[in-house]
Image (spheres, helix red, strand yellow):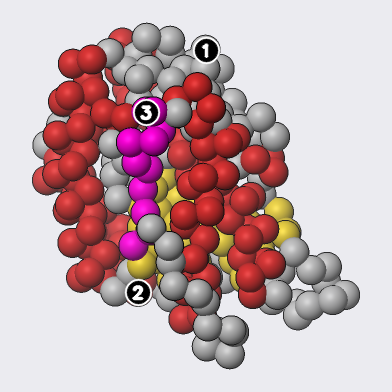
Amino acid sequence: MRRLARLYLHLLAHKPPADWTAPVADGRYGPSADDADDHPLTLLMLGDSLAQGFGAHRPEQTLGALLARGLAEGTGRPVLLRVHARAGATTADVGRQVLRAARLRPGIAVLIVGGNDVLLPAPLGRAARRHAHLARSLREAGWQLVVVPCPDPGYAPGFRAPVRWIGHHRSTRLARLHTRTVTRTDAHLAPTSGPEFHRRAARLLGPDGIHPSPHGYAIHATRMLPTLLTAAFHLAPSLPTPAPATR
């Protein structure tokens, strides 16, 4: 499905990416082993290009690295980042990403997917059911799950006008189904992108007008971090109570 999604993006975008390489940000963030316990908090990034950090120039600019650094600073614990997300992934592809994480110590899993599903001529109900199954599986495995509802491609000027209109309506529906899943699985709901990514596209989006720039990822991370700190508190109640998330 990833290859098919990339093919559709090439057909639907004004300037599709020529290179799908993203920086590799996996690793340990925060205090060194000498300054902290031997069991770092695991941060698992699942989903598509946004979760992978496609569009960032360096590993430290990716969404996963920004969140890992913020978690380490907010909790005082080291964070082990594992990015299994891949550009072009649909909800059907995430099942394999979850299987790869079976050997990891459960911590916080961030799930961002759906943007490619709404661009493909496939039923959204099926994608929503797969998303719900993934959420239940992760929660049953002991993960604190943070879900970002389906992003809205209507805010991306890099897509052709008809695609933005159709994508907006389909993503709105899928995001609503994702939010319902969050409630039913006792997961955490993180904010998604807003219209400012269209108004400030030159700064917050990359050259393709679709994927975030390093500045855009910084905006995403700032919005999402309070939700991740809340999830960390649920894993270890002895941590300081996080401040309320800002809108």
Residue at the image position 53 percent from the left and 83 percent from the top? 241
Q: What is the span of residues highlighted in magenta in the rendered image?
A: 189-199
Label 2 packing within 10 angstroms: few (<14), some (14-19), many (20+): few
Residue 197 drawn in magenta: yes
- Looking at the rendered image, the disc whose residue lies closer to the viewer, 3 or 2, is 3
Is label 3 in contact with label 2 (beta carbons under 8 Å)?
no
Any mark on residue 18, and which? 1
Q: Earlier in the sequence, mark 1 or mark 3?
A: 1
Residue at the image position 58 percent from the left and 36 percent from the top? 215
What's the distance in space between the residues labelled 2 and 1, CA to CA? 39 Å
Label 3 belongs to which residue?
198
- Looking at the rendered image, the disc whose residue lies closer to the viewer, 2 or 1, is 1
Q: Is residue 18 visible to the viewer in this orientation of the structure?
A: yes
Answer left or right for 82 relative to 228.
right
Q: Is residue 102 visible to the viewer in this orientation of the structure?
A: no
What's the distance in space between the residues labelled 1 and 3, CA to CA? 22 Å
* Residue 34 falls in image quadrant: bottom right
Label 2 belongs to which residue?
140
What's the distance in space between the residues labelled 3 and 2, CA to CA? 38 Å
Label 3 packing within 10 angstroms: few (<14), some (14-19), many (20+): many
Task: Note whether 160 is above or below 62 in the view shown.
Answer: above
Residue at the image position 50 percent from the left and 74 percent from the top? 243
Task: Note whether 10 is above or below 107 in the view shown.
Answer: above
